[in-house]
Image (cartoon, grey):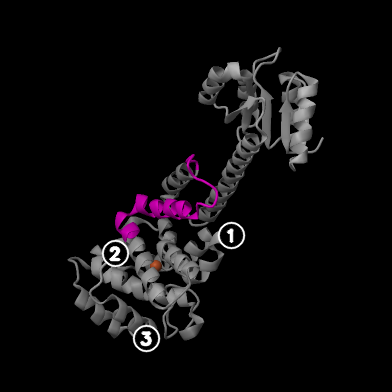
Amino acid sequence: MTPGGILVVDDDESVRETISRILQSKGFETSTANGPREGLAVAERIKPDLVLTDIKMPEMDGVEFARAIKQGHPDTPVIMMTAHACVETAIQSLKLGVDDYIQKPINWNQAVASIQSALDKRFLTLQNRKYVAELERQLVGCDRHDQAQFLKTVRGLFDAEEHARGAMLDTVESLAMAIGAKNATAKDHSKRVGAYVAKMAEALSFSEEEVRKLQLAGLLHDIGTIGIPDGILRKPVGQMTFDELAAYQEHPVTSFRILQPIREFQPILGAVRHHHERFDGAGYPDGLSGGRIPMGARMIAVADVFTGLNVDDIYGDSVNEEFAVERLMAERGTCLDPKMVDAFIEIFQGVAV
Ligand SMILES: [Fe+2]
């Protein structure tokens, strides 16, 4: 018996061997058990990826068996096989935590789709758990008072059922919401930076894929501020103490560390890490200058200044757009990339997001 794979449980030997053979012919690894008792023992040994079980068996009915499996292996999906007459029971069983049911005689196209979808969901759940664990590990180093709230939010969002494979934007939304859970202004700011950066990238004829990535970078560039106490975040940078400023300036690297474990975020890590670099090299965290700063970071820097001035309550009353453009011009070539400032002003004058 190989570890993982699908465990087929049925008291009728010919049925279970046939199902097992068909599943193998479709590329799945399988193990078999002749009933619930043996099923539980085999599951303990091989830790199956999925259990496919008959609903009516002598020792224990399928629903009871499913419950026992879930107790020992909460992430293992259980799919019931049922005769037509048992559909009512099968529907009932879904309410009791069974993941899906298949009617006998089995339509193999439907069965494989159901199995595949349950396996995908399991894979995603495990991946998300790994990710949250990684976040937890990263944040332990931050030693901030609101880690617990942040992790609770993220964990809750990652447990959401509707989170589907490939739904990267859901993940991003979740993370953006985690920022929002702490600070609504910060979430709004990040959304607007994302939108501005996407418009800039479109205007600069970047590919659709690039535009999407840059929007992600804009949305998530400040995720690292999650670990900074509100009292510091609310202060204008100029009024922070030496220690407060040091804590605040860690956020691009914290953002980088939070996103680093996820494969899909690799292309935006540079833009996120370096969004507080200055064009003249006097920024942080790495003191990069000019063209050495990733282009996405230079774009975020411009959108950041514009958006911050436009809505940020740090500066008291809303500052009008004209003043924001003036400020961009003042920082053109020192803090900000002149080319990006020119592109931004040309594209955005009079356009609000
Ligand atoms: Fe930032």
Mark 2–mark 1 distance (CA, rounded to whole Å)? 34 Å
Are dots 2 and 3 in contact, CB under 8 Å?
no
Query: Quick check: marks 2 and 1 in contact, CB under 8 Å?
Result: no
Query: At which x and y percent is residue 178?
Result: 41, 51
Judge whether residue 167 is colored magenta: yes
Callout 2 secondary element: loop
The magenta segment: 159-188
Label 2 environment density (alpha carbons within 10 Å; few <14, some 14–19, many ≥20): some
> Which label's residue is closer to the chain start, 2 or 3?
2
Looking at the image, is mark 2 or mark 1 nearer the viewer?
1
Cα–Cα gap, marks 2 and 3: 28 Å
Sequence order check: which comes first, mark 3 or mark 1?
A: 1
Marks 3/1: CA distance? Answer: 32 Å
Query: Dot 1: within a 10 Å radius of its alpha carbon, few (fewer than 14), some, or many (20 or more) residues?
Result: few
The residue tagged 2 is 235
350 and 185: which one is in front?
350
Disc 2 marks a residue whose amino acid type is: Lys
- Residue for badge 3: 338
Amino acid type indicated by mark 3: Pro
The residue under label 1 is 263
